[in-house]
Amino acid sequence: MVCWDPRIEEMPQEELERMQYKLLKSLVYRLYSFSPFYHDRMKEQKVHPDDIRELSDVTKLPFMFKRDLRDGYPDKIFTASQEELVRYHVSSGTTGKPTVVGYTQNDIDLWTTSLARALTSCGLGRGDVIQVSYGYGLFTGGLGLHYGAERIGATVLPTSVGNTERQIELMQDLGSTAIACTPSYLLHMGEVAEKMGISIKKETKLRTGILGAEPWTEGMRNRIQDWLGIKAYDIFGTSELSGPMFTECAEQKGIHIWSDIALTEIIDPRTEEPVAPGEKGELTVTILRKEALPMIRYRIGDITSMDDSPCPCGRTHPRIQRITGRVDDMLIIRGINVFPSQVEYALMGIPEVGQHFQIVVERKGALDDMLVRVELNRESFSDKITDIMAIRQKIEHRLRNSLNVMAEVELVETGSLPRFEGKSKKVIDKRSL
Ligand code: ADP
Ligand code: ZN
């Protein structure tokens, strides 16, 4: 195993926890003294920095929510002055009003270090050409990956999103060995390449995908890997944490969260109590060293579980499992909870189904109606109405079994559903329009 920083990445867990405690304690003192926002929050919660006597005392601290950042728009809760900032990013605002994140030079360095370790753990390094097809600009993905890739000595091809045919030509001409983008964009790229008569698997040097910024499933991973001949790794982050920060290692068994950077809790969103390792709950993160926009117990809203068993790769840092959705992503259909990822999971197990689907929910009378539009594989598309009916029934049956709710299925032609360059929108909920 090659580590970017073996001293930290292989550090025994007890040592890491001691380090986390020290960092947490000094963070809390600093914010109590210098941040009016955190000072007031701690007072309200009746907790003083002296009450933090061991790592588990983190649970005494108040939570922080996205709405706190919105209320503080644009920079009211920053703990660095504008002169100290070297950059701003603005979140994509997929769940409401955008939020602004400011960075000091140390914040950028920490983010870059986190990605340098992560990209190294995916087997990347000097000699690789990393095509960064995340958006450059206000979105954190492009610039974040760009700096991380440069830090490990790779060569960056900063294509950003869009202009897909040109991206594919450059991928061939400059020999990209890795690509960083959303899984939806890579699917789109694969299709465009095929239309151009190019097989990414056979006619490019691409062997690694660093894919994230939106939920995707194991089924989708397997399809992408087989189709494009690459290993696809999950990458996770949010703009409030800095941006995309953490990835899976070569084992592909969960995303390592560097303990010296982040203290992770998984809690039950209703009781706000921690859940046991392996159980699903809401990801809550304290970034232990952040200067401009500190985050204590930030309720990210993503649903996952924690695995602190030793990773076969030898890194001692805990892993979170694939994000299955957001607390606010959950659709309630006739009283039953449905996550879009469950739909994807069920669909990807059906060989005739293509890569793209869309969920449309509307209220008809007093009842919720869920329609799933599904693209079939080109090979499975047939003129014979009886074949099509049989496939449709199979999909409806599979969905009903795995979701416990009836969904109507509409089969649509390959290529007819919208394609996305950044984050995809798989759900149209007409009830909320
Ligand atoms: P916004 O909330 O405005 O979209 P971000 O661009 O920071 O802001 O998006 C972060 C969110 O994107 C995460 O909270 C999560 O819901 C989603 N996300 C990012 N990476 C992944 C991933 N690998 N798997 C699932 N969801 C992800
Ligand atoms: Zn590992």
Image: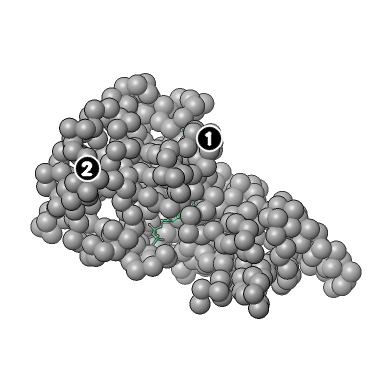
The residue that appears at 76% across and 62% down in the rendered structure is 396
The image shows residue 23 at horizontal and vertical percentages of 23, 33
Helix, strand or loop status at disc 2: loop
| Left or right relative to 433: residue 7 | left
Q: Quadrant of residue 31?
A: top left
The image shows residue 357 at horizontal and vertical percentages of 64, 65
Q: Residues within 10 Å of mark 1 (few under 14, many from 20)?
A: some
Q: Residue 209 has which mark? A: none
Up-down relation of residue 272 to residue 195 (above or below): above
Task: Please name whichever residue, 365 or 337, is drawn nearer the observer in this view of the structure.
Answer: 365
Task: Please name whichever residue, 137 or 345, is drawn nearer the observer in this view of the structure.
Answer: 345
The image shows residue 266 at horizontal and vertical percentages of 44, 41
Q: Residues within 10 Å of mark 2 (few under 14, many from 20)?
A: few
Question: Which kind of residue does numbered mark 1 sit on?
Answer: Gly
Up-down relation of residue 92 to residue 254 (above or below): below
The quadrant in which the N terminus is found is top left
Q: Nearer the viewer, mark 1 or mark 2?
A: 2
Question: Which kind of residue does numbered mark 2 sit on?
Answer: Lys
The image shows residue 70 at horizontal and vertical percentages of 29, 63
Helix, strand or loop status at disc 1: loop
Which label's residue is closer to the chain start, 1 or 2?
Answer: 2
Q: Residue 46 has which mark? A: 2
Query: Mark 1 sits on what residue?
Result: 278
Q: CA distance from mark 1 to mark 2?
A: 31 Å
Query: Which image quarter has ligand 1?
Result: bottom left
| Left or right relative to 238: residue 419 | right
Q: Quadrant of residue 58?
A: top left
The residue that appears at 46% across and 68% down in the rendered structure is 162
The residue that appears at 46% across and 64% down in the rendered structure is 422
